[in-house]
């Protein structure tokens, strides 16, 4: 009997995890571009639709290319944990979020979450879920006593949703503390792990029920494809309720983007090592620059969440934000002076990307709400890339020279 070789290294799982031998002996799982799959018999078709027999049916339901990407991410999020998990690849991170919420929540139920969420998540909970009578309670989840009081006194809260590090203020939430409280009161917990990646942080290690990623970002790593993933530890629930919602919502990934994602994941460890090294250098540079009022990066000793990040992350990561003293005009002027670094939303690509949340990703959030959450008019979000560090620092320095 053939035995499976035990993969004990993180990059080995990133490269080989989820891969199934191709029947035609292709080295890489091919891009299965067909829209449908044939059945050998009518009975086989019936058995696949009823779930009695595994196999592919229709590309909206999945394909070998999509399966490999999903299984690889599930393997990385559970690496070393001995926890079962199932991942479902989506067309985008927002698609994965929608499936998460609509699979777990119904009218009259609530989500407990914190301030400074990704702008798209903010709009989803306030503009879509609210219309479905699914309310959201937003509070400062650093205060565990306050969080417990809310969980204890509001039985309609069904899910705790955490984004840590948060976008774009980089605040970190205590996974162990919050998840422990949520479990005490019978709530499900979901974590957005996009900024950290499974290489830097594994929320399942602290008892999370679900993890989602915008896989467009660090997991893909090259800005070549859009996709998102939802991973859950209740495999039965993921294989039934969640799978059905995913298919009916039509948020399916496509094989081309899944193929690119799979190839990107293979280099995640080496990419993150370079990203993280460069980020620490950039944070130290910005922290002493006269044009900068504040740097949000947990690798700096003055960040209020440094201890939390150190407890649950391998490294502070490649994301940061900083506040310019000249506000909106300073932010626009700075971005316009960049020569090598790239003006763009998104993050996690090989090149350094900078954006101005107040005018882009959080434009749909009111100024009052933004500022309450620390997203000021002068805040710049920075995804530190893999270029030579001296070139990144030189470009940032010359762009800040007129501030």
Image: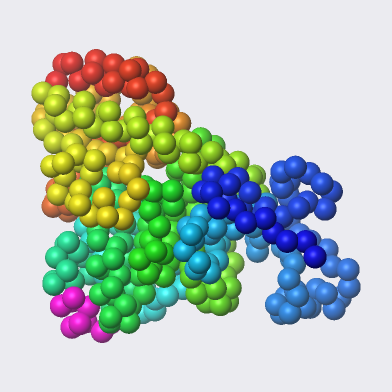
Residue 56's place in the image compared with 25, above or below, is below
Query: In the rendered view, does 282 fall on the left or right side of 211?
Result: left
Displayed quadrant of residue 175: bottom left
Displayed quadrant of residue 142: bottom left
Q: Majority secondary structure of the magenta segment? A: helix
In percent of the image, x 41 and y 32: which residue is there? Answer: 274
Magenta span of residues = 148-156
Residue 57's place in the image compared with 322, above or below, is below
Colour pattern of the rendering: rainbow
Asked if residue 262 shows in the view, the reply is: no
Q: Position of residue 306 (x, y in %)?
A: 20, 48
In percent of the image, x 50 and y 41: which residue is there? Answer: 268
The answer to which of 196 and 354 lies nearer the viewer is 196
Image label count: 0
In percent of the image, x 58 and y 47: which residue is there? Answer: 12
Q: Position of residue 201 (x, y in %)?
A: 38, 53
Q: Position of residue 368 (x, y in %)?
A: 14, 51
Displayed quadrant of residue 356: top left
The answer to which of 395 and 281 lies nearer the viewer is 281
Query: In the rendered view, does 220 fall on the left or right side of 380?
Result: right
Residue 287's place in the image compared with 72, above or below, is above
Q: Is residue 330 magenta?
A: no
| Quadrant in which the C terminus appears | top left
| Quadrant in which the N terminus appears | bottom right
In percent of the image, x 51 and y 54: which residue is there? Answer: 76
Asked if residue 309 shows in the view, the reply is: yes
């Amino acid at each position: 009997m053939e035995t499976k070789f035990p993969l004990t290294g993180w990059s080995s799982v990133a490269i080989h995890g989820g891969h199934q031998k191709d029947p035609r002996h292709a080295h890489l799982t091919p891009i299965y571009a067909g829209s449908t799959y044939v059945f050998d018999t009518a009975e086989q078709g019936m058995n696949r639709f009823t779930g009695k027999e595994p196999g592919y049916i229709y590309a909206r339901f999945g394909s070998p290319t999509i399966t490999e990407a999903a299984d690889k991410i599930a393997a990385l999020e559970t690496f070393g944990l001995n926890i079962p998990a199932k991942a479902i690849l989506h067309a985008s991170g927002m698609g994965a979020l929608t499936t998460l919420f609509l699979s777990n929540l119904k009218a009259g139920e609530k989500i407990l979450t914190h301030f400074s969420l990704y702008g798209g998540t903010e709009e989803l909970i306030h503009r879509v879920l609210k219309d479905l009578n699914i309310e959201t309670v937003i509070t400062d989840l650093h205060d565990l006593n306050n969080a417990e009081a809310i969980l204890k006194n509001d039985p309609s809260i069904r899910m705790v949703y955490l984004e840590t590090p948060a976008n774009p203020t980089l605040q970190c939430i205590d996974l162990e503390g919050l998840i422990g409280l949520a479990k005490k009161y019978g709530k499900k917990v979901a974590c957005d792990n996009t900024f950290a990646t499974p290489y830097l942080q594994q929320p399942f290690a602290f008892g999370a029920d679900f993890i989602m990623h915008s896989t467009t970002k660090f997991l893909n790593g090259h800005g070549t494809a859009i996709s998102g993933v939802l991973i859950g530890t209740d495999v039965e629930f993921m294989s039934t309720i969640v799978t059905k919602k995913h298919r009916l919502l039509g948020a399916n990934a496509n094989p081309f983007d899944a193929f690119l994602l799979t190839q990107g994941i293979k280099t995640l460890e080496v990419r993150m090592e370079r990203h993280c090294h460069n980020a620490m250098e950039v944070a130290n540079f910005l922290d002493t620059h006269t044009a900068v009022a504040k740097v949000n990066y947990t690798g700096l000793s003055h960040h209020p969440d440094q201890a939390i990040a150190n407890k649950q992350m391998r490294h502070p990561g490649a994301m940061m934000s900083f506040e310019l003293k000249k506000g909106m005009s300073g932010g626009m002027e700075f971005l316009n002076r960049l020569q090598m670094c790239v003006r763009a939303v998104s993050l996690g690509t090989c090149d350094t990307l900078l954006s101005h949340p107040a005018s882009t990703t959080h434009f749909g959030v009111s100024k009052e709400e933004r500022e309450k959450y620390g997203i000021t008019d002068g805040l710049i979000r920075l995804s530190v890339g893999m270029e030579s560090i001296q070139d990144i620092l030189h470009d940032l320095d010359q762009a800040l020279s007129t501030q």
